[in-house]
Amino acid sequence: MNEVPSSFPGAELVSGGLDDLSAGRETEASLLVSMAAPRLRALGLDVPAGTEEPSHRLYELLASRDRGAHSRYNALVGRAVSFARAAEHASSENALAGPTPRAGGCSGAVDSREHADDQPG
């Protein structure tokens, strides 16, 4: 999945970070996405490889700009966590809904255990 749902909190950071990573730019957003890469990949997003130790690089980048690095760092991480939680919640709701039934009430899903006796011995 490459499309970031825009309705989720922090979507602009994740989307921008993915674009920046793809272009090889080291930005607040790209470093944040690199930090969250394992969780974002688990959600199905294609996250390009980023820098090593992105959390340290992000803090250094923020500290080089102003004195509020700690607060800004925590706020950015909070936005990434909010995005991931919203995506996980949406994903779990979709999983609970199950497949859309076909005409005639059959979901189209086949359980291989139902046909175990049909297999050649």
Image: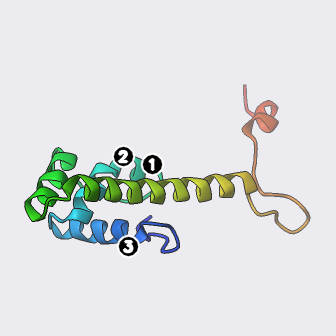
Residue 101 visible in rendering: yes
Looking at this view, is 117 or 27 the one in front? Answer: 27
Q: Position of residue 77 (x, y in %)?
A: 34, 54
Residue tagged by mark 1? 42
Q: Nearer the viewer, mark 1 or mark 3?
A: 3
Whether tag 1 and tag 2 are in contact, CB under 8 A, the answer is: yes
| Residue at 20% from the left image edge and 49% from the top image edge | 54
- Dot 2, crowdedness within 10 Å: few (<14), some or many (≥20)? few
Picture coordinates of residue 29, whole percent (x, y)? 26, 65
Q: Give the colour scheme of this rendering.
A: rainbow
Residue pictured at 45% horizontal, 64% vertical: 1
Category of crowding for the residue at label 3, using alpha-carbon neighbours closer than 10 angstroms: few (below 14), some (14–19), many (at least 20): some
Amino acid at the residue labelled 3: Glu
Look at the image and tell me whether residue 50 can be seen: no
**In the image, residue 3 lies at what x, y percent?**
44, 71
Name the mark on residue 12. 3
Read off the residue under disc 2.
38
Quarter of the view holding residue 93: bottom right
Between disc 1 and disc 3, whose residue precedes? 3
Q: Are discs 2 and 3 less than 8 Å apart at CB?
A: no
Farthest residue toward the right? 104
Q: CA distance from mark 1 to mark 3?
A: 19 Å
Task: Judge left or right: residue 22 versus residue 74.
Answer: left
Mark earlier in primary sequence (2, 3)? 3
